[in-house]
Image: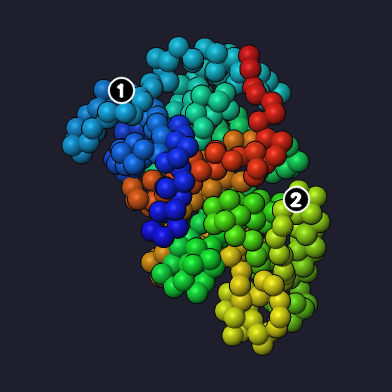
Amino acid sequence: MRFIGSVVERLQRHPKRIVFPEGTEPRVLQAARQFCSLQLGAPILLGDRTRIKRAAEALNLSLAGIRIINPEESEELDRFATVYERLRRAKGVQRAEALDALRKPNYFGAMMVAMRQADGLVSGASETSGSVLRPVFQIIRLAPGYSSASSCMVLEVEDTRFGHQGAMLMADCGVIPDPTVEQLADIAVSSGFLARQLLGIRPRVAMLSFSTKGSANHPSAQKMEAATALARQLAAQRALEADFEGELQVDAALVPEIASRKLPENAVAGLANVLIFPDLNSGNIASKLVQHVARANAYGHILLGLDMPAAEISRGANSHDILGVAAIVGLQAIEYRLLYPDAGAHVSGP
């Protein structure tokens, strides 16, 4: 709670509107109630109003201060469908198909964010990744200067020797299966910006591999080395003050005693607070191992590289996890222009 407690305190000073498309999901209802009770902002639940009220009654939860919208009955449905039809015209989407899509909560929620009627979106507690990410990526544009979206997890372990007082970011753990050198560099810089905002520290970004600085000659290790060099260039271009090192084995990245033997007197080795994985297999597996074996608090997946903040949560998330992710997304929204300076320069319209 050290990390998430600080996020909550900061968001209480600048409350935000977070839309939750899974309005009848018990864990989402509990998180929305906590979000409202902690005065973090206005939660927006999507779905059939009667079903949401029944679900809340079954949990003995008050819906006071929580907004409920049924996409099928919303006065915005027609306008949102017009925007979606225009966005997807190149894919052959017609009016009827656009209306059908916008009746679905994940599509409606993503459009609310794109149209600035909500400050962020959190979904995935009862949905597959594809059903959450597809509408988000179709509707919420990429931030200027980014060629792809990715994601990161924020994990907090009890041992404060790791990361920043036990908190660290891991990416990409949820979106790009086999990132290119360019995508890895984007992931590293985006994660660095987020680490600076969430943790208030200088990002120390480790580009991970099974090799440390040439100890193995393999294309995978060479890719991480190349991505490190490119990340440094991008960080300089985007005015991110951070340290990048790679390729590094994870023990060399996190454990000072091992780092002193493998890569002494290095700004990242043994001190990393951001871990960048070579592919989705390693990132997803590692983040879940840390979460369950080390009993870490895990918040994510926080989506990176988008014009507005959003998150795709795990179906294994509990209400505390969902609340934490919603708080992070809200905090992102406060200073999103610092994370992505040119984001929001364009707003979709009919």
- Crowding near the residue tagged with mark 2, few <14, some 14–19, many ≥20 C-alpha atoms within 10 Å: few
Q: Residue at x 67, y 35 (%)?
A: 343
- Between 195 and 46, the residue placed more toward the observer is 195
User: Hey, which quadrant is residue 125 in on the image?
Assistant: top left
Q: Is residue 14 left or right of residue 114?
A: left
User: Hey, which quadrant is residue 67 in on the image?
Assistant: top left
- Residue 282 visible? The answer is no
- Identified by mark 1, the residue type is Arg
- Look at the numbered disc 2 and give the secondary structure of its residue: loop
Q: Residue at x 44, y 67 (%)?
A: 157
In percent of width and height, residue 121 lies at 49, 36
Residue that mark 2 sits on: 239
- Identified by mark 2, the residue type is Ala
Q: Could you tell which of marks 1 and 2 lies nearer the N-terminus?
A: 1
Q: Residue at x 39, y 14 (%)?
A: 73
Give me the disc on residue 150: none
Quarter the N terminus occupies? bottom left
Task: Decide: is 169 above or below 76.
Answer: below
In percent of width and height, residue 145 lies at 76, 41
- Residue 157 visible? The answer is yes
- Between 110 and 86, the residue placed more toward the observer is 110
Quarter the C terminus occupies? top right
Of labels 1 and 2, the one closer to you: 2
Give me the disc on residue 49: 1
The residues tagged by marks 1 and 2 sit, at their Cα atoms, a distance apart of 46 Å
Task: Decide: is 350 above or below 46.
Answer: above
